[in-house]
Image: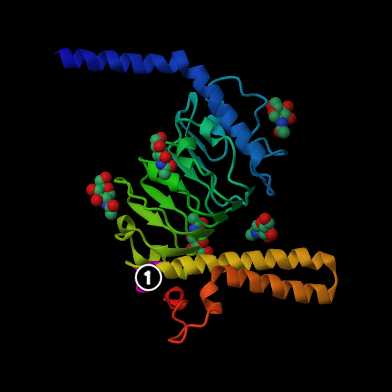
């Protein structure tokens, strides 16, 4: 009986807390949607400057945001966002701001838009309770944030059809039942904890290796050399741009050649040493 009483008290507290604290929570969720709307580009006017769909002028009562396009609340009479489904609306811009204010959100679907730029590094702090995260079919770039490892409620993570780069972090979440990173620019080994997901969910990343994919991972240092080559290429392009401004063909040729040579020598000193039996002192460097 004691346990039962405790449960009843807990339920009573829970139900009254929403009316006690309801306004604080609601205000935060309204601000969440305001910030979100402000941070994204909406060429088709879906959320509306002209249309009235996301109009905050009349937000006075609890539940008013629950009728907005794509917004679902925990309870239709309370401004507390459960899910945000904004897929295939032609939205653009960086990863939206303000989502950390939707503190009870469990579903975020931004798929099939044209969002770009990196994901927030501390994404798990912005949406700690999200269980469904679909960012597929956008133009997101940069690395997959390691903090996703802290999103313990995650069931579904869809990152396919973007421009993510770098290695996949070792995400090991007990509730994760779907994981998809197909068609990105990821490279390096598939972490052990993710090898049970279907091969198709990793395809379209030429640099990825290891199970469940067919191509075996080469030795670790090759990955490092790959990273270095990419960096050297980036550096070279930057130098080229810089020199372009000088606008003198002879200077460009000579200094680009000199700097490229310098960079290569810096990263691959052994290429400039004679390897062989006749050079016992440099033999070790050449390995
Ligand atoms: C928002 O709603 C208010 C009141 O209903 C209305 O006067 C205003 O024109 C609306 N704004 C937009 C941008 O639709
Ligand atoms: C993403 O694009 C692919 C191919 O263009 C399509 O098959 C898939 O349904 C799209 N998914 C979403 C969530 O928009
Ligand atoms: C996506 O946005 C980029 C600019 O950020 C633009 O060049 C491109 O046309 C857009 N693509 C679509 C399908 O709207
Ligand atoms: C996960 O959360 C813990 C505690 O908040 C933090 O110390 C850790 O750095 C986080 N891990 C990642 C990968 O962000
Ligand atoms: C994932 O985590 C579980 C428990 O947290 C652990 O038992 C398991 O070995 C981990 N798997 C991998 C591949 O790291």
Residue displayed at 58% across by 68% down: 266
Q: What element carries label 1?
A: loop
Quadrant where the C terminus sits is bottom left
Whether residue 245 is visible? yes
> Count the marks: how many?
1
**Position of the N terminus by quadrant:** top left
Question: Is 176 or 9 nearer to us in this picture?
Answer: 176
Kindly identify the residue that appears in the image at 46 percent across and 87 percent down.
278
Instruction: Give the magenta range.
Output: 213-220
Q: In this view, does 219 lie above or below 34?
A: below
Q: Is residue 129 visible?
A: no
Q: In which quarter of the image is residue 243?
A: bottom right
* 132 to the left or right of 100: left
Query: x and y percent of residue 226 in the render?
Result: 50, 69
Specify the color scheme.
Answer: rainbow
Vertical order, 124 against 250 (above or below): above
Seen in the picture, residue 136 relative to 66 is either above or below; the reply is: below
- Which residue is rendered at x = 44% and y = 31% of the image? 104
Give neighbour class at mark 1: few <14, some 14-19, many 20+ (Cα, 10 Å). few
Q: Where is residue 175 in the image (x, y as percent from the top left)?
A: 31, 45
Q: In this view, does 42 lie to the left or right of 165?
A: right
Among the 4 quarters of the image, the one containing residue 56: top right
Pick out the residue farthest to the right: 248
The x, y position of residue 19, in whole percent, is 45, 15
Q: Decide if residue 207 is on the left or right side of residue 69.
A: left
The residue that label 1 is drawn on is 219
246 in the magenta segment: no
Q: Quadrant of ligand 1?
A: top right
- Front residue of 115/233: it is 233
Which residue is nearer to you in this view: 104 or 84?
Answer: 104
């Amino acid at each position: 009986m004691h346990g039962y009483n405790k449960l009843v008290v807990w339920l009573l507290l829970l139900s009254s807390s929403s009316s006690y604290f309801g306004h604080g929570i609601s205000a935060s969720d309204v601000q969440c949607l305001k910030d979100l709307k402000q941070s994204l580009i909406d060429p088709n006017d879906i959320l509306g400057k002209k249309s009235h769909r996301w109009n905050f002028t009349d937000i006075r009562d609890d539940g008013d945001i629950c009728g907005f396009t794509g917004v679902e609340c925990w309870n239709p009479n309370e401004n507390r966002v459960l899910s945000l489904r904004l897929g295939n609306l032609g939205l653009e811009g960086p990863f939206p701001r303000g989502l950390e204010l939707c503190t009870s959100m469990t579903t975020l679907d931004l798929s099939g838009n044209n969002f770009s730029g990196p994901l927030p590094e501390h994404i798990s702090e912005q949406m700690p309770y999200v269980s469904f995260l679909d960012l597929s079919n956008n133009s997101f770039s940069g690395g997959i944030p390691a903090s996703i490892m802290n999103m313990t409620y995650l069931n579904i993570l869809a990152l396919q059809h973007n421009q993510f780069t770098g290695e996949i972090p070792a995400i090991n979440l007990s509730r994760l039942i779907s994981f998809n990173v197909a068609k990105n620019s990821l490279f390096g080994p598939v972490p052990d904890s993710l090898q049970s997901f279907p091969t198709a969910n990793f395809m379209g990343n030429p640099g990825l290796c290891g199970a469940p994919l067919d191509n075996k991972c080469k030795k670790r240092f090759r990955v490092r050399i790959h990273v270095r080559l990419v960096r050297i290429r980036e550096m070279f392009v930057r130098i080229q741009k810089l020199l372009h401004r000088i606008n003198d063909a002879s200077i460009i040729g000579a200094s680009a050649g000199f700097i490229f040579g310098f960079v290569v020598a810096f990263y691959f000193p052994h290429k400039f040493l004679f390897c062989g039996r006749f050079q016992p002192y440099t033999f070790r460097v050449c390995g």
